[in-house]
Image (cartoon, coloured by chain):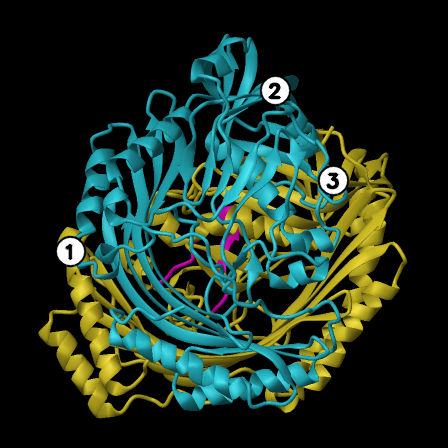
Chain colours: A cyan, B yellow
């Protein structure tokens, strides 16, 4: 690709140093292929404690990493947060030393080759975040403080505003040369409320992450947090029972989307550590189980034109009408399976090798109105949040319901204390009975309300 | 590797002048150089062999309840001055909007230098030797049994050279050397897949690898053992926790609630409980990160605000004695700091954190404890655990368990979760073992991951809610 000359001069330093590094790696006879990832980030954050501003933080970082492979497939990796020519050379020497010392890996095929992207992604960069004035986000935080202070049940709120600007290049010896400039800003809120009459506290949390500054809505974040915290009051212990379960979008993310994202990670899969092994192209869930991973949505938090290895991102159907269709690959796992990478290589920073992750993961909406989800439930459970996560190897899940309520005659009622839920995810997928027609988004995960026909609930009454 | 040089006195006077002019009441600067090795193999193949080199500085400024923090990679004099200027500007912004006004209490300056006590420096060991060592763990695990289907072995080491200076006049240089080893093993039989992981870590040199000599075999053995474990049926039981589970239970369920920053933020169930009975009579809980010959993974000489580590008695005979403090919480609660202001690196701000937290031993032997239990469960090790510090609700997943029937250990079980309310459960302890064992771990809080140790003896608790799949 061509480099946009409007980029700040500093970024051309990144380009030049990245190219410089790649040229050095190519001087080593033993190196079969190599890659330089060079990245600059700037963060700004304001911390909120006890419903008051406590601190402001600014940080910047610039670093690079190098991957070198030899013919035997041995990988040497090294990184540093100094992009002077001297350190680049020294770091590459270290990577080559590591590569030579390492054992072979015959499963490694090659680094990716140049492939044109068919989509131009827009809306993932906002100048208002990159050039953010310190003063500006205080208004958001002040809105958060004001909104929660107006509610007499609030004991305290903590949270933060944070913004991130990232600029990176990927160069490899097979001709890949890509760059991306991205921004994100987020608000988080965690609120403790008290029911003075019963001397009981409840808590809730909510967050919002956006690519564009103007999309942040502090009042909405606090109102959602408050709603969750208040629903956590009036807690009761219940008896053990087998009843219908409704998952909120947060519940769907923790019980369905996050476990699926781990289970379809091709690395987990290839090492036989996923409960979905042996089930590709089989129908393993209800017709209402429709999930896709779409990295090509303009403006979305999980979108980008290329992944962290320079492979174009895609839109993939993961589950369609309950049939399990696709895995998420980076170039290593794709090479091992003799398929094309799905463009799911991700890096938290220059200091990590590319692992595999979902882009924008969607549980697609159904056609059920909210009221219809609940109306025929005589007694059931609403699950909003559990701190537990399923065993990805077996699909078994047993967890404590931290935020959940009893449903009686279609109405959401008391909150739950010491209540556990246990189910295997494959049973859960098969028992999906209704899916709401509206989605809620939490960063790169998007989910509707989902009703499960019956689940074992262990109460402590 | 480079070592941060103590800042020149004329730079320090410049910084002091700048801070005074801008009405800054406290500031500190941490500079660090770190380097490390990571080796990761899976199924005997090379997954990653890496070398890292990181340097930078984190600068804090404080005024009347507001903090500013600036992180720079460049550690030249001009960059440090720019960073302090930025932190000062941010501190004033924070102060303008902050509701809670307080001062940072001054303590006596400390000028010291500390170096990890070790036998074999990490840099004296060739990468080839580290690779061979880690590959042997892989081989041990893989060859243990044909039912082993996936192995993953990791070796990681690092050295950190750091310098801290602050406006009290303290200047502390520390050289820290750490090492940690993991073995993860998955085993499968008739469609039943079970995983196990073991780790060994410490503050010291390459000699720590001796502790991990048989870690691959140990990890594979436990994964195979889990294949024959049965899922458990939920209910209320008498539970005996092994030292690993006791340690992590005390850390998660109690230790976090003792962190004074959470107490101030009204996010701890231990708020306003100082001096009150919070646990059974014989329970004593201590956090002591002082370096010892045990080379514990959570140990340190000075915390990241320059306060010396010392034993802190959190609970004595069931009574809550004190909280874990950083500089800010100690100032706000008008007590002396106790060496628990810790940050994951120069690029993060110190928070009130644990170091080496353990429950003190008493007088029971394990076999006596089992013989004395009619209907119970012996729980070994843990997969994960969490607590809501504001409500005290906790949940722990144990690795495996044995049923205890009429004083005898019987059937092996898996996927057991323990839950309850922390202040209730610590009052139902009915027996405390006679020997403390420590485990290493990484603890996360506010996005920062720091090294930690937990410890305790076998511990018996009555009426614990257990959840399972059935």
Q: Residue at x 58, y 19 (%)?
A: A238
Q: Chain of mark 3?
A: A
Q: Which residue is mark 1?
A: A135
**Disc 3 crowd, CA 10 A, few/some/many (<14, 14-19, 20+):** few
Q: Chain of mark 1?
A: A
Identify whether B356 is placed above or below A454. below
**Of the residues tagged 1 and 3, which is closer to the observer?**
3
Q: Is residue B241 magenta?
A: no
Q: Which mark is residue A461?
A: 2
Lower position in the chain sequence, tag 3 or tag 2 = 3
Q: Which residues are magenta?
A: B310-326
Between residue A4 and residue B74, name the one nearer to us. A4
* Residue A357 horizontal side relative to residue A423, left or right: left
Identify whether A80 is placed above or below A106. below
Q: Which mark is residue A279?
A: 3
Q: Is residue B127 visible?
A: yes
């Amino acid at each position: 690709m061509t480099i946009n000359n409007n980029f700040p001069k500093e970024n051309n330093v990144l380009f030049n140093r990245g190219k410089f590094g790649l040229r050095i790696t190519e001087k080593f006879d033993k190196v079969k292929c190599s890659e330089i990832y060079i990245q600059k980030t700037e963060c700004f954050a304001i911390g909120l404690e006890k419903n008051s501003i406590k601190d402001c933080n600014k940080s910047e970082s610039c670093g690079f990493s190098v991957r070198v492979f030899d013919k035997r497939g041995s990988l040497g990796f090294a990184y540093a947060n100094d992009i002077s020519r001297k350190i680049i050379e020294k770091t590459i020497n270290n990577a080559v030393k590591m590569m030579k010392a390492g054992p072979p890996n015959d499963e490694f095929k090659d680094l990716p080759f140049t492939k044109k992207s068919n989509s131009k992604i827009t809306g993932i960069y906002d100048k208002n975040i990159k050039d953010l004035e310190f003063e500006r986000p205080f208004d958001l935080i002040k809105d958060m403080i004001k909104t929660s202070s107006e509610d007499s049940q609030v004991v305290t709120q903590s949270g933060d505003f944070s913004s991130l600007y990232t600029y990176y290049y990927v160069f490899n010896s097979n001709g890949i040369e890509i760059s991306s400039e991205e921004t994100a800003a987020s608000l988080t809120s965690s609120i403790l409320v008290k029911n003075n009459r019963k001397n009981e506290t409840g808590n809730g949390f909510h967050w919002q992450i956006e690519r564009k500054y103007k999309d942040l809505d502090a009042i909405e974040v606090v109102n959602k947090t408050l709603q969750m915290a208040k629903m956590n009051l009036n807690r009761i212990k219940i008896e053990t029972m087998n009843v219908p379960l409704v998952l909120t979008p947060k519940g769907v993310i923790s019980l369905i989307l996050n476990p699926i994202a781990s289970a379809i990670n091709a690395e987990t899969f290839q090492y036989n550590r996923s409960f979905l092994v042996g089930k590709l192209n089989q129908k393993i869930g209800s017709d209402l189980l429709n999930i896709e991973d779409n990295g090509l949505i303009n403006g979305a938090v999980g979108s980008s034109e290329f992944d962290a290895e320079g492979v174009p991102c895609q839109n993939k159907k993961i589950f369609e009408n309950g049939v399990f269709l696709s895995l998420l690959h980076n170039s290593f796992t794709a090479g091992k399976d003799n398929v094309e990478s799905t463009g799911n290589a991700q890096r938290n920073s220059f200091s990590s090798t590319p692992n595999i992750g979902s882009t924008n993961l969607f549980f697609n909406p159904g056609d059920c109105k909210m009221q219809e989800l609940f109306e025929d439930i005589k007694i059931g459970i609403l699950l909003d949040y559990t701190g537990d996560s399923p065993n990805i190897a077996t699909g078994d899940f047993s967890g404590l319901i931290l935020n959940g309520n009893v449903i009686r005659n279609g109405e959401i009622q008391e909150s739950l204390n010491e209540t556990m839920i246990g189910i295997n995810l494959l049973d859960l997928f098969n028992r999906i009975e209704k899916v709401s027609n509206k989605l809620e988004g939490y960063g790169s995960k998007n989910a509707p309300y989902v009703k499960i026909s019956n689940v074992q609930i262990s109460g402590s009454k | 590797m480079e070592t941060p040089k103590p800042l020149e006195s004329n730079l320090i006077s410049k910084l002091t002048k700048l801070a005074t002019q801008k009405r800054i009441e406290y500031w500190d600067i941490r500079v660090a150089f770190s380097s490390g090795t990571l080796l990761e193999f899976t199924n005997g193949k090379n997954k990653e062999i890496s070398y890292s080199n990181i340097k930078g500085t984190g600068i804090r400024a404080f005024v009347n309840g507001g903090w500013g923090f600036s992180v720079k990679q460049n550690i030249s004099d001009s960059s440090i001055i720019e960073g302090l200027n930025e932190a000062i500007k941010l501190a004033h912004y924070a102060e303008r909007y902050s509701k809670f006004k307080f001062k940072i209490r001054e303590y006596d300056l400390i000028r010291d230098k500390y170096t990890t006590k070790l036998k074999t420096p990490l840099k004296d060991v060739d990468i080839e030797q580290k690779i061979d060592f880690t590959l042997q763990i892989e081989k041990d695990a893989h060859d243990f049994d044909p039912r082993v289907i996936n192995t993953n072995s990791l070796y990681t080491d690092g050295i950190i050279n750091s310098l801290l200076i602050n406006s009290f006049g303290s200047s502390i240089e520390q050289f820290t050397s750490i090492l940690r080893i993991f073995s993860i093993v998955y085993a499968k039989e008739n469609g039943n897949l079970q995983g196990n992981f073991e780790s060994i870590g410490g503050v010291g040199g390459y000699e720590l690898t001796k502790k991990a000599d048989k870690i691959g075999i140990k990890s594979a053995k436990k994964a195979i053992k889990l294949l024959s474990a049965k899922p458990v049926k939920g209910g209320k039981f008498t539970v005996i926790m092994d030292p690993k589970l006791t340690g992590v239970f005390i850390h998660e369920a109690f230790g976090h609630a003792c962190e004074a920053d959470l107490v101030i933020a009204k996010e701890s169930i231990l708020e306003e409980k100082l001096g009150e009975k919070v646990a059974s009579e014989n329970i004593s809980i201590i956090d002591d990160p002082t370096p010892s010959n045990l080379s514990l993974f959570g140990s340190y000489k000075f915390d990241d605000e320059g306060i010396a580590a010392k034993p802190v008695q959190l609970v004595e005979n069931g009574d809550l004695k004190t909280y874990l403090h950083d500089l800010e919480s100690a100032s706000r609660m008008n007590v002396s700091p106790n060496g628990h202001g810790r940050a994951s690196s120069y690029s993060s701000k110190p928070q009130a954190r644990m170091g080496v937290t353990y429950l003190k031993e008493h007088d029971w032997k394990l076999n006596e404890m089992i013989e004395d239990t009619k209907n119970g469960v012996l729980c070994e090790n843990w997969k994960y655990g969490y607590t809501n510090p504001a409500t005290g609700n906790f949940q722990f997943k144990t690795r495996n368990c044995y049923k205890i029937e009429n004083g005898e250990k019987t059937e092996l079980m898996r996927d057991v979760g323990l839950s309850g309310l922390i202040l209730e459960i610590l009052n139902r302890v009915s027996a405390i073992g006679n020997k403390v064992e420590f485990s290493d771990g990484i603890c996360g809080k506010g996005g920062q991951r720091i090294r930690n140790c937990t410890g305790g003896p076998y511990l018996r608790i009555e009426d614990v809610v257990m959840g399972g799949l059935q």
